[in-house]
Image: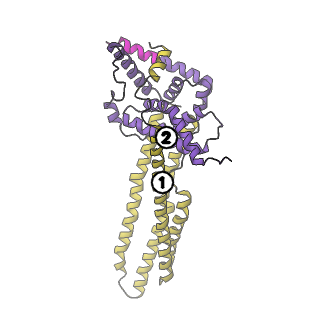
Chain colours: A purple, B yellow
């Protein structure tokens, strides 16, 4: 005879699976809201706490992925308003980015590094809703799924994404013409 | 111009943002953090509730044994205020309302802003429905004592220092709320607005 798993055991199992699957994405998401490693870590921790509290109430009415991103962005918004490490954040631009790889050519690495820095700074310069939409888009969510997360229509998402792309293009051009 | 595919490649190629902690380690710290927070909130609510019960019981006894009507009335008001705290706090004073983080982002932002507005309104009005009745009660009791002392032919002004101390305590509480708690909430709301500006 099978015994029913304890609800807490089930929650642990779900939590571990979600973290195994999405921790990388959650850390990238934290990078959209904060630059300093400690701030990003705080955001990830708070998201993990919010997830843990929300798991028992998840009834599968929406997809697990969109549910997780809603929790993650909402928690990040709540905590990023409270973060008081702006000065530290400004002074730690280089922290937390990729370390050189031996196998990689130095020039290529520098170019990729520059692009990466530019991308994250450009994203953090966007209005918060645009940041959320772009990061969800970059995590491969469809317009419909992004709409489910943000509460906007897929049409509005498409328009917004096109505007974000224009803005990023402008930013990239400015970067290219800069001596 | 960085093409979209490369953009995605740069985005997902963040080595630093890849897994740095084991899921089990994170789960352990999350459970610990959740328990600590819950215990802190429960302990704070319990302390406030016990304080309310103590005030209610002490002033009920004081009202019972008070020698004049005005003193009895004042003490009764303070006792009722304490009983109100003891009743209200365990039911509604469970800390900031926990928002549903699984709401969609647009709805959540609106709820968050509304939550701050509600807390600010509550804090602005708390002095009228929680502090003022207790102060009026204490003041009535002290005036009653003064009148009784005068009627007994004693010096009623010996009572003045205790009135001054009680007034100072109530004023300090009011000032803390007005110039510390309220600006803090306002600042949190402003921070949220700054983070979400142009976002809607």
Q: Quadrant of residue A122?
A: top left
Q: Comparing marks 1 and 2, which lies closer to the viewer? A: 2
Name the mark on residue A127.
Answer: none
Which secondary structure, mark 2?
Answer: helix
Q: Which residue is mark 1?
A: B123
Q: Residues within 10 Å of mark 1 (few under 14, many from 20)?
A: some
Q: Quadrant of residue A106?
A: top left
Chain where mark 2 sits:
A
| Residue at screen point 36% across, 13% down | A108
Q: Residues within 10 Å of mark 2 (few under 14, many from 20)?
A: many
Q: Which residues are magenta?
A: A167-179
Q: Considering depth in this image, is A30 or B188 the residue closer to the camera?
A: A30
Does the magenta run of residues contain A177? yes
Name the outermost residue toward the right.
Answer: A1
Q: Is residue B168 left or right of residue A4?
A: left
| Residue at screen point 33% across, 18% down | A102
**Disc 1 and disc 2 in contact, CB within 8 angstroms:** no
Q: Considering depth in this image, is B163 or A173 the residue closer to the camera?
A: A173
Which secondary structure, mark 1?
Answer: helix
Name the mark on residue A48.
Answer: 2
**What is the chief secondary structure element of the magenta stretch?**
helix
Q: Is residue A127 above or below residue B4?
A: below
Quadrant of the rendering where the C terminus of chain A is positioned: top left
Q: Position of residue B54 (x, y in %)?
A: 47, 71
Q: Quadrant of residue B138?
A: bottom left
| Residue at screen point 54% across, 61% down | B90
């Amino acid at each position: 005879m099978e015994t029913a798993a304890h609800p807490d055991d089930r929650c642990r199992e779900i939590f571990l699976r979600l973290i195994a699957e999405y921790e990388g994405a959650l850390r990238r998401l934290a990078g959209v809201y904060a630059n300093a490693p400690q701030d990003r870590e705080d955001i990830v921790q708070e998201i993990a706490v919010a997830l843990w509290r929300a798991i028992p109430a998840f009834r599968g009415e929406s997809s697990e992925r969109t549910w997780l991103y809603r929790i993650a962005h909402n928690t990040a918004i709540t905590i990023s308003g409270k973060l008081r490490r702006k000065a530290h954040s400004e002074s730690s631009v280089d922290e937390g980015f990729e370390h050189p790889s031996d196998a990689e050519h130095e020039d290529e690495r520098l170019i990729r590094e520059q692009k990466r820095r530019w991308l994250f700074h450009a994203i953090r310069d966007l209005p918060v809703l645009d940041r959320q939409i772009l990061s969800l888009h970059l995590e491969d969510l469809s317009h419909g799924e992004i709409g489910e997360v943000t509460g906007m229509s897929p049409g509005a998402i498409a328009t917004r994404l096109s505007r974000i792309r224009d803005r990023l293009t402008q930013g990239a051009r400015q970067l290219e013409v800069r001596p | 111009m960085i093409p979209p595919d490369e953009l995605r490649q740069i985005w997902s190629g963040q080595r630093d943002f890849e897994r740095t902690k084991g899921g089990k380690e994170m789960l352990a710290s999350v459970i610990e953090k959740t328990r600590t927070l819950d215990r802190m909130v429960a302990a704070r609510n319990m302390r406030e509730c016990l304080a309310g019960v103590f005030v209610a019981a002490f002033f009920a006894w004081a009202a019972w044994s008070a020698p004049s009507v005005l003193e009895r009335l004042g003490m009764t008001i303070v006792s009722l205020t304490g009983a109100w705290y003891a009743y209200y706090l365990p039911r509604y004073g469970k800390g900031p309302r926990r928002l549903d983080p699984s709401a969609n982002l647009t709805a959540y932002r609106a709820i968050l802003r509304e939550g701050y507005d509600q807390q600010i309104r509550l804090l602005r009005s708390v002095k009228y429905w929680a502090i003022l009745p207790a102060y009026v009660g204490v003041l009535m009791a002290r005036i009653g004592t003064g009148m009784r002392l005068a009627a007994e032919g004693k010096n009623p002004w010996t009572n003045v220092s205790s009135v001054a101390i009680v007034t100072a305590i109530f004023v300090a509480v009011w000032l803390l709320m007005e110039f510390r708690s309220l600006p803090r909430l306002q600042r949190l709301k402003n921070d949220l607005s700054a983070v979400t500006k142009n976002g809607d």
